[in-house]
Image (tube, rainbow, N blue to C red):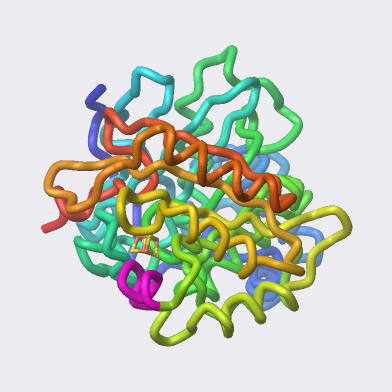
Amino acid sequence: MNLQPKTDNKQPGKVDLRDMSLSELSGWASSLSLESFRARQIFRWLWRSDVTSFDQMTDLQKELRQRLSELSYISSLRPEKIERSQDGTRKFLFALSDGNHIESVLIPEKGRYTLCLSSQAGCAMGCLFCLTGKGGFKRNLKTSEIVNQILAVQGALLPDEKLSRSSASGGLTNLVFMGMGEPLANYENLIKSLQILLADEGCGFSSRRVTVSTCGLVPQMDRLGKDITLNLAVSLHAPDNETRSFLMPINRTYPLEVLIDACRRFPLPQRRMITFEYLLIYGVNDAPEQAQALARLLKNVRAKINLIPFNAYPGSEFKQPPPEKILAFQQILVKNHYTTMIRQSKGADISAACGQLHAHAIYAN
Ligand code: SF4
């Protein structure tokens, strides 16, 4: 489906209200000598009601709306293109105001609507199996560009998909930062967007339903654990340093022993576990000995494991293991008492599967 191209409506000289956390908005409102409750009132309009103009903020006086519109603006994203997979997955392409493009992926599953968010245009991490990584890094996304993905996808849901109107997420149930980019490499904007997502006056998501995935930026993992409570996923993909450094250059900076120590000290609420993502690649990391090594590596970590059979894309040098190898790998982990799921990547036919997002590679100037 091709839609009217529309970028965020950046207005030079004005501040974008959707770039501000509630505390920043409060500081800004106070600098304008507005009453203290105004910031909360405006914040709710921005995120709970998804307004696009100040005229829609009907409980603000006309003079105040006029003043706000002279000093600030409300950015938004509109999908430039939506592709639908045979399995129901939808991929949204967004054009940013500077010509860069990003993608978000909506995965409907058994009453759950999970949105996979991008945090950067491109990615600098260079993981060998990842099409986003192959396209290189463009820039970090602003807070508004991260959170506006949610409002834009919510707006594109069909009426019967909007299961819940209890939050601005209306219909979306889960958020995962597993789209384009390494979220922890855009730390400040990630944290601000999480504060908006989790705030009652903001999008109102429960922290149990928000997951940040990292390739293993250890210092930022430590910061994240102190700054906010949510679910953590770690892209592991290999049980030994040689294989992991081959697949993921970040492993040369933070090798497995350093990464796993960081996982052990990551503060988790009771009964929560870290999800370890393991892309199974034929002949690279799918041997029974590697499953045994993975079981040893994660000993004493509160871990559950997602095995993701690799989805080949045109030009990829890797292949998916045959089903019997995938099952044998899983059985070894299960015998070692790990909760281990085989997760078929969704949306492979529209290049929306794990590691296949590549909007910038195709569309960027
Ligand atoms: S897998 Fe994630 S961290 Fe690695 S290159 Fe791709 S987007 Fe970046």
Give the quadrant of the N terminus: top left
Does the magenta-highlighted stretch encompass residue 236?
A: no
- Of 347 and 343, the residue lying toward us: 343
**On screen, 18 above or below 84?**
below
Q: Residue pushed farthest right?
A: 270
The image shows residue 23, relative to residue 151, as above or below, that is below
In magenta, the rendered stretch is: 242-250
Quadrant of the drawing holding the C terminus: bottom left
Q: Residue at x 58, y 51 (%)?
A: 65
The reply to whether residue 203 is visible in this rendering is no
Between 236 and 194, the one lying in front of the other is: 236
Q: Could you say where residue 276 lies in the image, as x and y percent from the top left?
A: 58, 57
27 sits to left or right of 322: right
Please identify the quarter of the rendering in which residue 164 is found. top right
Picture coordinates of residue 64 (x, y %)?
A: 63, 55
User: Relative to residue 48, is residue 30 depicted above or below?
Assistant: below
Does 174 appear above or below 192?
above
Q: Position of residue 129 (x, y in %)?
A: 29, 57
Return the residue nearer the eye: 312 or 348. 312
Identify the main secondary structure in magenta.
helix
Residue at screen point 43% across, 40% down: 325
Work out whether residue 165 can be spotted.
Answer: yes
Does the magenta portion include 249?
yes
